[in-house]
Image (cartoon, rainbow, N blue to C red):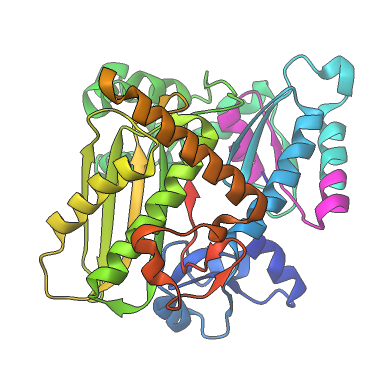
């Protein structure tokens, strides 16, 4: 799993705590985490907890280029590679005759990545993806570890319940309220009890707490969500600025969906107010669509439905989910010609933006952001990173 840019930056600054982000923490180094800092924390709180931290605004597009270079080198080693933000799962099943010792193959991959990018990465090797990730966590940063199948049961026994794949914060709170703190203690619960607690995920969790995971490596997985969000440079109640930013964020999210060959079925709009309160509203599209105007129309409706408080907005975000595969939107019979023309138009836009940068084309309400926000070749410089999960 590649280390984050923030982790690498700390090494060049005398191991000082380093934060990447603007408004909130996007990522932070291990030295910063020792002070209780974490992703999503407001920078005001981070400065209070760690006054000597180095704060870098960072640039998601630059980090993405490094990540893609690392993933390309992973694909030279593994026939199937699944990527997620700054992690790569490599399926090495059946490659022993090609690579020989898999531990040595991983060392070679680490050397190759270091030579190409200057970054250190952590590699974990295990009998399944869950255990490979967990054993890698034991040797961060820039480490290498291997867990044999025979040792999986013992290794998993003392892991906190949060480290069992599929146990999120809500599930962990439920388990800890029952005094179940480790994977070993979780094993005492009958499968039927886990199923009553967590539904269809219950039987899977019963397997995973023993270290057994049947999840396969998918080279091109449909993400759970695509979100684009930002903090405003100053809290604002200006409807023109807010709607302009929403249109820009929707356009970025739609472009990402089209690049992945998927169409979102659900659109959500998230608001963060200047007083710390937040709100979110989601609705499904009548027909899944990756077209900017279709997603924007619903996003604007959700925005107008939520903005009822007389408090300026601090942040704004849009999230897509419930994806289906497909290239362009599907409409009713007499709308197909228009839908086809619109799909061709946005494919042309995407080609231009890929060649010259997203910021070369700005339209609609987003034009009102011109002169208000800094720009570079990637578009408007946002204060929070964009995520595809």
**Residue 236 falls within the magenta-colored stretch:** no
Query: How far across and how far down the image is residue 75, in percent?
Result: 75, 31
Q: In which quarter of the view is residue 102 placed?
A: top right
**In this view of the protein, which residue sits in the foreground, 118 or 49?**
118
Q: Is residue 118 above or below residue 80?
A: below
Q: Is residue 57 left or right of residue 346?
A: right
Q: Which residues are magenta?
A: 112-137
Query: How far across and how far down the image is residue 307, in percent?
Result: 15, 63
Query: How far across and how far down the image is residue 346, in percent?
Result: 48, 41
What is the quadrant of the N terminus in the image? top right
Identify which residue is drawn at 61% across, 74% down. Answer: 17
Identify which residue is drawn at 43% across, 43% down. Answer: 254
Q: Is residue 312 above or below residue 387?
A: below
Question: Number of callouts in the render?
Answer: 0
- Is residue 274 something one can see in this rendering? yes
**Residue 118 falls within the magenta-colored stretch:** yes
Q: In which quarter of the view is residue 45 placed?
A: bottom left
Q: Is residue 98 left or right of residue 211?
A: right
């Amino acid at each position: 799993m590649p280390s984050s840019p923030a982790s690498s930056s700390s090494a060049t600054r005398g191991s000082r705590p380093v934060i990447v982000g603007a408004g909130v923490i996007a990522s932070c180094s291990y030295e910063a985490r020792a002070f209780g800092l974490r992703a999503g924390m407001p920078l005001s709180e981070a400065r209070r907890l760690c006054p000597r931290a180095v704060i870098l605004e960072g640039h998601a597009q630059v980090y993405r280029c490094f990540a893609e270079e690392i993933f390309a080198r992973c694909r030279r080693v593994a026939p199937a590679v699944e990527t997620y933000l700054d992690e790569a799962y490599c399926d090495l099943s059946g490659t022993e005759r090609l690579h020989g010792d898999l531990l040595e193959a991983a060392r070679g991959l680490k050397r190759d990545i270091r030579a190409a990018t200057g970054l250190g990465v952590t590699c974990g090797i295990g009998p399944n993806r869950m255990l490979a990730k967990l054993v890698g966590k034991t040797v961060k940063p820039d480490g290498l570890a291997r867990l044999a199948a025979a040792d999986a049961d013992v290794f998993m026994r003392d892991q906190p319940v949060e480290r069992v794949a599929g146990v999120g914060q809500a599930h962990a709170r439920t388990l800890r309220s029952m005094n179940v703190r480790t994977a070993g203690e979780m094993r005492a619960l009958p499968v039927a009890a886990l199923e009553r607690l967590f539904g269809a995920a219950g039987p899977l969790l019963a397997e995973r707490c023993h270290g057994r995971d049947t999840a396969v490596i998918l080279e091109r997985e449909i993400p759970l969500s695509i979100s684009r969000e930002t903090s405003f440079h100053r809290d604002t109640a200006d409807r023109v600025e807010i709607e302009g930013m929403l249109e820009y964020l929707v356009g970025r999210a739609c472009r990402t969906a089209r690049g992945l060959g998927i169409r979102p079925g659900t659109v959500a709009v998230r608001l963060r107010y200047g007083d710390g309160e937040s709100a979110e509203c989601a609705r499904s599209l009548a027909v899944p669509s990756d077209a900017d105007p279709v997603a924007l129309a619903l996003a604007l409706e959700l925005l107008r439905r939520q903005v009822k408080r007389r408090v300026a907005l601090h942040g704004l975000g849009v999230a897509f989910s419930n994806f289906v595969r497909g290239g362009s939107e599907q409409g009713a019979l007499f709308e197909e010609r228009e839908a086809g023309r619109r799909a061709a138009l946005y494919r042309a836009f995407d080609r231009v933006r890929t060649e010259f940068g997203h910021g070369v084309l700005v339209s609609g309400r987003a034009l009102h952001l011109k002169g208000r926000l800094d720009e570079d070749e990637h578009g408007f410089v946002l204060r929070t990173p964009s995520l595809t999960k």
